[in-house]
Every structure is written in structure tokens, then in C-alpha cells.
Image (spheres, rainbow, N blue to C red):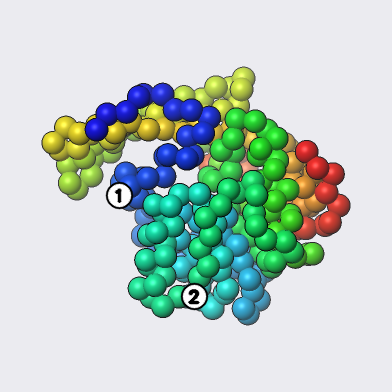
């Protein structure tokens, strides 16, 4: 199995496949999901039986954990492969989670959620800024008045000190993954080229490109959608963001004063 080394602006339609599910998600360390769920509960100020949207839910690890805690979850994702796994796990545990196939630019809910969260660098997928703005507009439309949005996003300033251009990982079954990272400073994009090589020498090439936004840009984009930034943190425990942090958690609240793209 060999694919072209290039990836298009629509990479998100193919990247989240069986290879991603089998290998990429192994990077998630045990215990991180629970810590993420703690932060989501706290920063969204969820109350008993709050209705929450997991935007770009993937295989459902956050939706599952929050549903176990009694919240009413909806998970939206474009990948049928990952949604099938999320539904399988929810069914196995008897959790009533609604998993919806859809594009994050067009969330099929209006004034429906107490909170929305977007975790694990699932924003900035689109080459055109208008499409990324459409995501935030859709989030605002899906939130109830006063509802909160939590965005987990890379902090490039903190990452630059230890920036790596290539990573190589060997998995237990002998598969090797190479991950090459190219940062275009002028365009503010980060290109990721991924190659899997199995023990029997099957090869699968894939990749993704992310539009990187700095904090001030994100504040403007959120404001255009009618989402006011109320807090920014440098970790899941809620410490102040500094230029040494490699991620930031942005909390924004729906104001009903959107100005559009």
C-alpha cells in the first residue's frame, strides 16, 4: 500500500483513518483523558446534566469520559472510521452519547449547548481563514446564550525552544512511523508529513497542514463570532499562560454580538 507523498488542502478527509486509529492515538499517555475532562468540567463551569458538544470528537475519548460523569454529550466528527469506534465503545459501556457525522464549519445545532470544547489541536485545519472563522461562527451558533467554549491549542512561542523537525517512533508490532514537521513562518502554517512502514514493508503516506494562529489573532476571530475571551491558561490546572508553555487553553463566552467573518 503506497500513497503519494503530498497532501492536499482537504487532508482532513483522509488523514483520520484506520492507520491513525491504530497508531497515532498511541501517543496519548494514560491518565491524560481524565485530566482533560477535569479541565473541561472546570473551565466550562458545567453543572449537573449540562449538555456538551465535543467538537471533532474523534474516537470519543473525551465524550466517553464526560458521559461517565453524568453529562449529556454530543460528539461531532467527519471521520466515519473514528465515529464507528466511538459508537462501539459507547455501546459497550451503555453510554447514551449522540455521535454525529458532520463538518465543523456547519454544526447542525442552534442554541443547544451549555458548553462546547475542541481539544487536541483540532482547529486551523483549513487553508482559507474564512473557513476557520466559519468554525467559530458555528460554535457560537450552537451555544446557548452565556454558554462557554474551550479551545485547546498549541502555543508556538513555548514550543520553539525545543522545536523538532522530525520524530521517529517504533510501535510494538514493528511498525515504524516517521513524522517530518515544516514550519512556514511567513504563512504561519505547520506541515506534517507522516510515513508508516510496517514490519512486512507496507508503506502508508499521509499528512496534515495546520494554519497556526497567535493569541491576538484568535481573540479577534472569537470576537467576530460573538465569543468573548474570559480566560487563558497555560495548562490544564489553570496556571497563567507564559511564553514557556507549549499549549494554551482559551475560554470564551457567547455574547450574541457576532460581527461575522
Q: Residues within 10 Å of mark 2 (few under 14, many from 20)?
A: some
Q: Position of residue 174 (x, y in %)?
A: 17, 41
Q: Residues within 10 Å of mark 1 (few under 14, many from 20)?
A: few
Of the image marks 1 and 2, the number of the one nearer the N terminus: 1
Residue 194, image quadrant? top left
| Near-viewer residue (45 or 161) | 45
Q: Position of residue 141 (x, y in %)?
A: 74, 56
The residue depicted at 79 percent of the width and 64 percent of the height is: 145
The residue depicted at 15 percent of the width and 38 percent of the height is: 199
Q: Which mark is residue 96?
A: 2
The residue depicted at 37 percent of the width and 66 percent of the height is: 88
Q: Which mark is residue 22?
A: 1
On-image quarter of the C terminus = top right
Which mark is nearer the camera, 1 or 2? 2
Q: Residue furthest left?
A: 200
Q: Is residue 9 left or right of residue 27?
A: right
SS at circle 2: loop
Q: Tell me, yes or no, if residue 232 can be seen here.
A: no
Q: Position of residue 202 (x, y in %)?
A: 20, 34
Amino acid at each position: 500500500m503506497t500513497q503519494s507523498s503530498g497532501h492536499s488542502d482537504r487532508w482532513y478527509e483522509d488523514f483520520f483513518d484506520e492507520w491513525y486509529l491504530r497508531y497515532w492515538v498511541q501517543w496519548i499517555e494514560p491518565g491524560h483523558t481524565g485530566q482533560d475532562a477535569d479541565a473541561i468540567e472546570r473551565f466550562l463551569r458545567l453543572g449537573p446534566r449540562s449538555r456538551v458538544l465535543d467538537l471533532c470528537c474523534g474516537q470519543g475519548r473525551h465524550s466517553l469520559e464526560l458521559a461517565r460523569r453524568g453529562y449529556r454529550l454530543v460528539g461531532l466528527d467527519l471521520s466515519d472510521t473514528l465515529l464507528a469506534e466511538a459508537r462501539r465503545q459507547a455501546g459497550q459501556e451503555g453510554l447514551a452519547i449522540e455521535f454525529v457525522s458532520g463538518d465543523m464549519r456547519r454544526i447542525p445545532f442552534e442554541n443547544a449547548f451549555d458548553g462546547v470544547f475542541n481539544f487536541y489541536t483540532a482547529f486551523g485545519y483549513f487553508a482559507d481563514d474564512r473557513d476557520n472563522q466559519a468554525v467559530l461562527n458555528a460554535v457560537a451558533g450552537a451555544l446557548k446564550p452565556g454558554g462557554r467554549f474551550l479551545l485547546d491549542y498549541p502555543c508556538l512561542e513555548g514550543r520553539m525552544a525545543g522545536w523538532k523537525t522530525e520524530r521517529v517512533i517504533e510501535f510494538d508490532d514493528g511498525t515504524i512511523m516517521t513524522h517530518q514537521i515544516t514550519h512556514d513562518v511567513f504563512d504561519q502554517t505547520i506541515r506534517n508529513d507522516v510515513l508508516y512502514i510496517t514490519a512486512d514493508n507496507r508503506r502508508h503516506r499521509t499528512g496534515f497542514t495546520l494554519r497556526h494562529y497567535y493569541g491576538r489573532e484568535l481573540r479577534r476571530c472569537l470576537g467576530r463570532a460573538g465569543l468573548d475571551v474570559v480566560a487563558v491558561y497555560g495548562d490544564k490546572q489553570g496556571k497563567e499562560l507564559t511564553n514557556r508553555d507549549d499549549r494554551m487553553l482559551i475560554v470564551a463566552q457567547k455574547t450574541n454580538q457576532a460581527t461575522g467573518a
